[in-house]
Image (tube, helix red, strand yellow):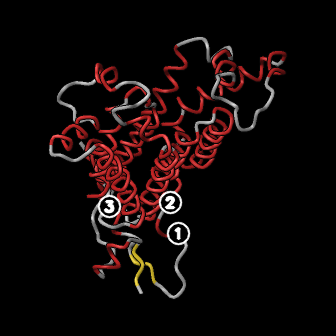
Amino acid sequence: MKKLNLIYTKVENFFFKQDYQAEFLSFFRISIGLIILLQFTAVMADFDKLFSSSSIIPQDIMGVFTPEWIITFPKIINFFHSLGIPESTTMIMTKISFITLCIFIIMGFYSRISAFLLLVLQIALLKGSSFFTYGADFFTSMSLFYLILFPSDQIFSVKNLINGKKSGTINITPVKRLFQLHISIAYFFSGLDKALGFNWWNGESIWKAIHLPYSNRDLNMDFSWLAEHSYLLIFIGWSTIIIEMCYPIFIWYKPTQKIWLLLTISMHIGIALILNLYYFSAIMIIWNITNFYFEQPASKRSAIPGKKVISGQVIG
């Protein structure tokens, strides 16, 4: 019975013990807001070609795979058009709204509400142009979802500056643990999926990836020499599987946490530089830093000169 009580106490503390370390909240809010804003501005020039009624792929074709009950951007355009508002005006207002909500998130101006509205708008764009989406877009949606769950505008935010309030004492541990378990499970099953086949074990997947039409465009490196050194391709493939499948083990084990965080971030930097998947890599690096870089006891964090640290809170 004592062992059961001990296990219960440990599980309860893991999920619900108050964690006063909240620096990661401002980092996550600002970095995700910036990345979403940069990604949106990158497609601004082609926004009409991707999302308007005269898009490259006709909306009728893209709508075939979208359930009727889902609110998509074409439906929003049609709704405002029925009210006498032209499509061009809706497009302009959408761009302004998207950028404004991103800025609100970055500044910490009612980030939860801003993240919710941006999530609705982002999903509407995502579902209305499914042929142009890829994995990073879904991680964007999940990032906004966590910004809704986290009280991210309680630290280093305009909201606090306006209201004149200090950081609250909301228990963020349950959401933080959910986020950490989420990324751990995601990496494990990503590695497991690679391990179940043979292409990653023999290096074939790495060879194909670096020779995709959209890969290696910026550095323009010659990888033909790898054909004579296939052991390097095998090593990279095995390393990717090991890093991802062992992530839930070594990222939680304190002695190996930093090295595994470094290995994972290095993997995503390689993906960004070689495969040119900058947006996806940036989001995954932010997720990793948010969840595990700030994992340290309050007593070991740097104190602010002239201030006292009591129970993990800065007093002064």
Q: Residue furthest top?
A: 198
Position of residue 295 in the picture relative to residue 181 (left or right): right
User: Which x, y percent locates residue 67?
Assistant: 22, 24
Residue 62 in view:
yes
Q: Nearer the viewer, mark 3 or mark 2?
A: 3
- Mark 3 Cα within 10 Å, few/some/many (few <14, many 20+)? many
Tags 1 and 2 in contact by the CB under 8 Å rule?
Answer: yes
Q: Which mark is residue 169?
A: none
Q: Which mark is residue 111?
A: 3
Q: Which residue is mark 2?
A: 296
- State the SS at label 1: loop
- Quarter that holds the C terminus: bottom left
Asked if 8 appears above or below 55 in the picture, the reply is below
- Quarter that holds the N terminus: top left
- Mark 2 Cα within 10 Å, few/some/many (few <14, many 20+)? few
- Mark 1 Cα within 10 Å, few/some/many (few <14, many 20+)? few
**Which of pointers 1 and 3 lies earlier in the amino acid sequence?**
3
User: Which x, y percent locates residue 40?
Assistant: 46, 47
Position of residue 232 in the picture relative to residue 171 (left or right): right
- State the SS at label 2: loop
Q: Which residue is mark 1?
A: 301
The amino acid at mark 1 is: Arg
